[in-house]
Image (spheres, rainbow, N blue to C red):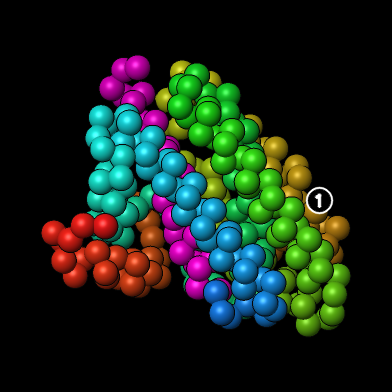
Amino acid sequence: MDIATKNNLFELILALADDELILGHRDSEWCGHAPILEEDIAFANLALDEIGHANLWYALLADLEGEHSQRYADQLVFWREAQDYRNTQLVELPNGDWAFSILRHYLFDSAEIERLNALAECSHPLVSETAAKIRTEELYHLRHTTAWMRRLALGTVISHQRLQAALNQLWPFTGQLFHLSAVPEGLDELGIQIDSARTNWESQVIPFLADCQLRLPDSPVLMQNRQQHSHHLSVLLSEMQSVARLDPRAGW
């Protein structure tokens, strides 16, 4: 693998890892606050899964760099500033109400399955193996959020209105879900076809939203690169990194 391809692969995996980490942190914030006890437990498990997936991707980055996996993961998680993260803005936004969090998870989970399908075809064995392993759990996540989407969309007038309001706010951020690398065409050498993954995602998500009697907003989809973040990420990181930064010499 030449240096340019390696760097491009690094950026892609970093984006995947950061997406999982930040969404996992947002999921953890529902613990003790979900509308029913079962969802307290469910979202705590979702948080653990997402952070576990992030750790798998960070370990793969350590392998690419020839570094110790856990020390390298800790460095990436606790010692980067917001501008160095590569997650989509979709996952860093505050949780909002239950409809907002469910819709965000549905949009992310459904996109994640398509991204993992594409990555499972990667010629790099560690990438394809990691993608296949994560995909198994993400299928359960998608099943969970799909059921809640139907429950809210077809439940009461108020639950439907809240879901529509969430869609109006979140849909523009979906443009970043498949914008994983600054030079996406460089991934062709590794057999990764992200463009087709977005097409597959739209062909499933848009009809499903229509079945839920939800209307896509007229606002354009944002296509910023992943170096652009809202102020919400800085707030999240200040909390997530606070303990580690109390004593940089501490062991875990």
Instruction: In the rendered view, tell whether residue 179 sits above or below residue 101.
Output: above
Residue drawn where x is 48% and y is 22% of the image: 125
- The quadrant holding residue 83 is bottom left
Q: Is residue 206 left or right of residue 90?
A: right
Q: Decide if residue 141 is on the left or right side of residue 54.
A: right
Q: Does 78 appear above or below 117? A: below
| Image coords of residue 185 (percent x, y) | 46, 27
| Nearer-the-camera pick, 194 or 9 | 9
Residue type, numbered disc 1: Pro
Q: Is residue 220 visible?
A: no
Q: Residue at x 25, y 50 (%)?
A: 75
Residue 211 screen position, x and y as percent: 86, 58
Question: Residue 160: percent from the left, percent from the top?
Answer: 79, 74
Count every numbered label the image shows and give the total. 1
Query: Which quarter of the rendered picture does the C terminus lie within?
Result: bottom left
Q: Which residues are magenta?
A: 1-30
Q: Which residue is mark 1?
A: 207
Residue 10 inside the magenta-drawn segment: yes
Establish if 160 lies above or below 213. Answer: below
Is disc 1 placed on a helix, strand or loop?
helix
- Residue appearing at x 27%, y 70% in the figure: 242
